[in-house]
Image: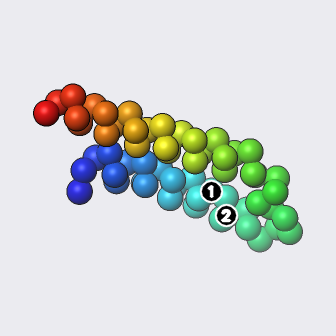
Amino acid sequence: MKKSTWLPLALALMGAAFYINYGIEYNAWIKNLPLIIIDVVICVALFFALRKKEEYKK
């Protein structure tokens, strides 16, 4: 599996683990929505950056 695939996925799962930890509280996901959006944007940007880097190495 390529690094551009597993690294953003691992980061997204780690970020989700922090949000799930607060899932016991009522409407915790609404409080953490900006952080979840930022995490998704970072993971997508990391995916495209690593994919572009792997293409340049070839």
Which residue position holds label 2?
Answer: 21
Quadrant housing the C terminus: top left
What mark, if any, has residue 31 been given in the picture? none
Secondary structure of the residue carrying tag 1 is helix
Residue 25: name its quadrant.
bottom right
Going 66% across and 46% down the picture, which residue do you hit? 37
Q: How is the image coloured?
A: rainbow
The amino acid type of the residue labelled 2 equals Asn
- Please report the residue visible at 75 percent of the width from the left and 52 percent of the height from the top: 32
Q: Position of residue 20 (x, y in %)?
A: 66, 65
User: Residue 7 in the image: x percent, y percent?
Assistant: 37, 48
Q: Residue furthest top?
A: 56
Asked if the residue under mark 2 is in contact with the one under mark 1, i.e. CB atoms within 8 Å, the reply is yes
Of 45 and 3, the residue lying toward us: 45
> Neighbour class for label 2 at 10 Å: few (<14), some, many (≥20)?
few
Give the alpha-carbon distance from disc 1 to disc 2, as whole Å.
5 Å
Q: Quadrant of residue 41?
A: top right
Give the residue at mark 1.
Answer: 18
Residue 22, position as x, y percentages in the image = 73, 62
Q: Amino acid at mark 1?
A: Phe
Quadrant location of the N terminus? bottom left
Q: Residue furthest left?
A: 58
In this orientation, which residue lies closer to the viewer: 3 or 56?
56
Q: Is 29 situated above or below 44?
A: below
**Total number of numbered discs in the rendering:** 2
Residue 3 % position (x, y): 28, 46
Q: Is residue 22 left or right of residue 26?
A: left
Q: Residue at x 32, y 45 (%)?
A: 4
Q: Secondary structure at mark 2?
A: helix
- The residue lying toward the viewer, choosing from 41 and 23, is 41
Q: From the viewer's perspective, tell me whether residue 30 is left or right of residue 11.
A: right
Q: Residues within 10 Å of mark 1 (few under 14, many from 20)?
A: few
